[in-house]
Amino acid sequence: GESVGLHLPTLSVQEGDNSIINCAYSNSASDYFIWYKQESGKGPQFIIDIRSNMDKRQGQRVTVLLNKTVKHLSLQIAATQPGDSAVYFCAVRNSGGSNYKLTFGKGTLLTVNP
Amino acid sequence: DAGITQSPRHKVTETGTPVTLRCHQTENHRYMYWYRQDPGHGLRLIHYSYGVKDTDKGEVSDGYSVSRSKTEDFLLTLESATSSQTSVYFCAISPRDSEKQFFGPGTRLTVL
């Protein structure tokens, strides 16, 4: 079955630095990827998504990079702020399965130090 | 939270009692989902619905049932709660032809 993992369970950065959060997936049939942010006591919040026909997508202060060759996904946050402190996790969809089923990673805790 | 509410937000119950959690949306989205979130695990799908009265099982459906009699409401029922069902439960919605899922604020359930 699909497994979605993260390289680091925690990441600590200084305010103003750039943050990179990584995600590995195992199914080469995965065709849609999404990043969520979850603050303590809240529900996951959509950040950015990317389809498998793209390598890079940018949003406001965030960039998602997709490397299908090594089945790796990363989320880059520019000029990290204290408000970015949260758990970040990726989710993937397999093109061979139900259109709307996502498999979620366990998450990385990002801590931003002032 | 994308027009999604969950009730109750917190609940403590005893083993063996029935529990129903409610998810209500104001977005008129077709798809609705119930997940549980536990330490050491990613979000795991319990059940989902692709329309009124149309539901299907997810990966951890044992011990749970769902119902959707209206577009806006998706109910999750634990017929006889067990301690292993202590968790945070999230409802999510997504519109037709979109993989994006938008989550509610969650319900923290404790089964003693």
Image (cartoon, rainbow, N blue to C red):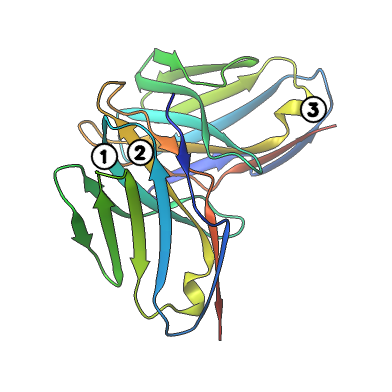
Q: Position of residue B73 (x, y in %)?
A: 45, 28
Q: Mark 1 is on which residue type?
A: Tyr
Kind of element beneath mark 2: strand
Residue closer to the observer: B6 or B48: B48
Q: Mark 2 is on which residue type?
A: Val
Q: Mark 3 is on which residue type?
A: Ser
Q: Quadrant of the N terminus of chain A?
A: top left
Q: Position of residue B59 (x, y in %)?
A: 51, 21
| Discs 2 and 3 lie in a common subunit | no
Label 1 – label 3 distance at C-alpha: 35 Å
* Residue in the picture at 37% in, 81% down: A79
Q: Which residue is mark 1?
A: A32
Viewer-nearest of labels 2 and 3? 2
Please, is residue A10 above or below residue A111 in the view? above
Q: Position of residue A91 (x, y in %)?
A: 39, 42
Q: Is residue B89 left or right of residue B3?
A: right
> Which is nearer the N-term, disc 1 or disc 2?
1
Q: Which residue is mark 3?
A: B83
Label 2 – label 3 distance at C-alpha: 30 Å
Q: Do the residues bearing badges 1 and 2 touch, measured as CB atoms within 8 Å?
A: yes
